[in-house]
Amino acid sequence: MERRSSTSQVSSGKATTSIDFSHQVQIGAGSRNFTSSLTIQAGRSNKVTDTLLKSISQGWSDRGFGDYTLPGDNYPDWLNFKSEGLSVWFKVPQVRNRSLKGMILCIVYLSPEENTASVYPVSVLIKDYTKSNIELYKRDAATTLEDEKWHKIINDLMPGNEVEVKVEFFARQLNVKETVIYLVYGEDVGNRKCIEY
């Protein structure tokens, strides 16, 4: 038994896109739990983010019941950091001739079969220990966008910064299996060579 749904909201003319994929796959015969996921994207949408989001979605549909595969690193386009539970700690890497363009957060959790209630509201807390800075991003629904706030968060993450990203669900208690952060990189515009005629 497999249930997949996805919602997508793209902001035209703005830098940030937010896309959610919710997947549920039943675990084992007669089991009452489903493995589910929530995916949140922040930053500029481009071919790299589109490819990564497609790969995340296919990891659910291609593996069958009770199993999933999330993509690993694809240097220099994206790097991932993962942890069991609700938070991930990482040091922002320096990627030569690239700059951080976005972040994709994927939360994998167990959900009881009879409980199909929304996971919203959800908040994402980003602690930058290097700058002693804390940002809170709250979402009340799958279509909520806060473009300027996410753009600022992405721009403030500099190479070498020690960062923790923590997710909180307010609607219900979830058994979170894994949280994965993907840092998405793009070519530095300042490093492009100009051709003079």
Image (spheres, rainbow, N blue to C red):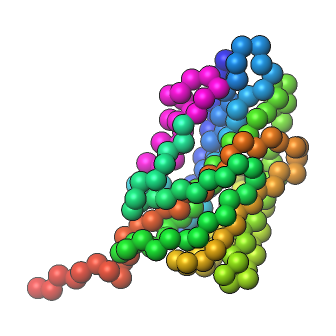
Foreground residue among 89 and 15: 89
The kind of secondary structure the magenta stretch mainly shows is helix
Residue 33 in percent (x, y) is at 78, 26
In reply to whether residue 176 is colored magenta, the answer given is: no
Residue 68, by quadrant, is top right
Vertical placement of residue 159 versus 58, above or below:
below
**Residue 102 seen from this side:** yes
Q: Residue at x 79, y 33 (%)?
A: 111
In reply to whether residue 55 is colored magenta, the answer given is: yes
Residue 122 in percent (x, y) is at 79, 54
Q: Residue at x 68, y 84 (%)?
A: 131
**Residue 140 seen from this side:** no
From which residue to which does the magenta span run? 51-68
Vertical placement of residue 64 versus 95, above or below:
above
Residue 89 in percent (x, y) is at 67, 64
Foreground residue among 145 and 165: 165
State the quadrant of the C terminus: bottom left
Residue 195, by quadrant, is bottom left
Foreground residue among 44 and 109: 109
Along the horizontal axis of the image, is 60 left or right of 107?
A: left
State the quadrant of the N terminus: top right
